[in-house]
Image: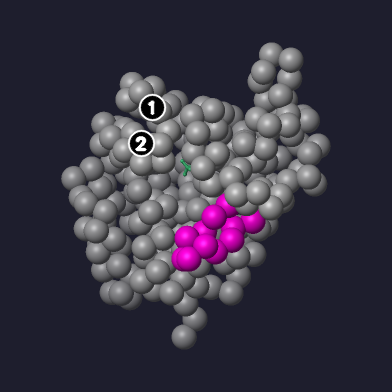
Amino acid sequence: MKKPVIAIDGYSSTGKSSISKIIADKLGLIHMDTGALYRGVTWYALQHCLNENGQIDLHQLFSSFDKINLEFKNNDGTLILYLNNNDISKEIRTNSVSDNVSLVAKQKEVRDFLLQSQRSLAEKGGVIMDGRDIGTVVLPNADYKFFLTASIDERTNRRFLELKGLGIEADKGQVKQNLIDRDKIDSEREIAPLKQADDAIIIDNSELTKERTIELILSHIQKI
Ligand code: DC
């Protein structure tokens, strides 16, 4: 039997990636956190493509795509993102990446650059992919589509705790503002904006634990 293709989209810090990873383990699927790819490109830009004002020079970034090799490698069941053979899994979670990623992700050139690798991974089935435009643009024919949302305060707490767990200093007010700003840019951009697919199942997990959210998603998958 062909394994399913599952798309999980939604707002920042709704738990998309950690939930997708657990579902992948349970169902024997490959998990791709597509936000990490956008973060990886942003990290590269912050290292190599800054103008004299310290801002990202987008044209320099667009002409550097052939120097950017992003790969996920499996480390004891956890997929670690490598940029040109260097582990950047911690760097992509830093505040400077979070503050710049939505600007980078709204560029058509960047989205086109990352589209093919996302689609080819899903060709053989057996994939769960999380992001913002998976059900709408990347994998419109996915077998199952979910859209996760939660209140801004709940998402702020989750992100704050995630950063703390990674040993990254954070201020709650700033974390909240970053989520608000990113959601706005991600939802209002022209290309592949964050929005639920017409055929996606919406889950508001403000008051649900991660385990309960996973159960709910699995109940839909196993029903069909
Ligand atoms: O899931 P995340 O918070 O790590 O994603 C980081 C940013 O990447 C997010 O603010 C928007 C962008 N992104 C996107 O535009 N499309 C995707 N499929 C995934 C992420």
Q: Is 66 situated left or right of 8 in this image?
A: right
210 vs 42: above or below: below
**Under 8 Å from ligand 1: the CB of mark 2?**
no
Using residue 72 as the reference point, say whether residue 13 is left or right of it.
left
Part of the protein shown in magenta: 70-81
Identify which residue, 209 or 188, lies in the foreground: 209
> Which numbered tag is attached to residue 40?
none
What amino acid is at disc 1? Answer: Ala
For the view shown, which residue lies furthest in the top direction? 53
Residue 170, disc: 1
> Label 1 vs label 2: CA separation?
7 Å
Determine whether 89 is above or below 201 in the image.
Answer: above
Quadrant showing the C terminus: bottom left
Q: How many numbered marks have been drawn onto this rendered protein structure?
A: 2
Q: Residue at x 29, y 61 (%)?
A: 214
- The answer to whether one can see residue 171 in this image is yes
Residue to which mark 2 is pinned: 164
Name the colouring of the figure: one colour
Along the line of sight, which residue is nearer the eye, 170 or 102? 170
Magenta stretch, main secondary structure, is strand
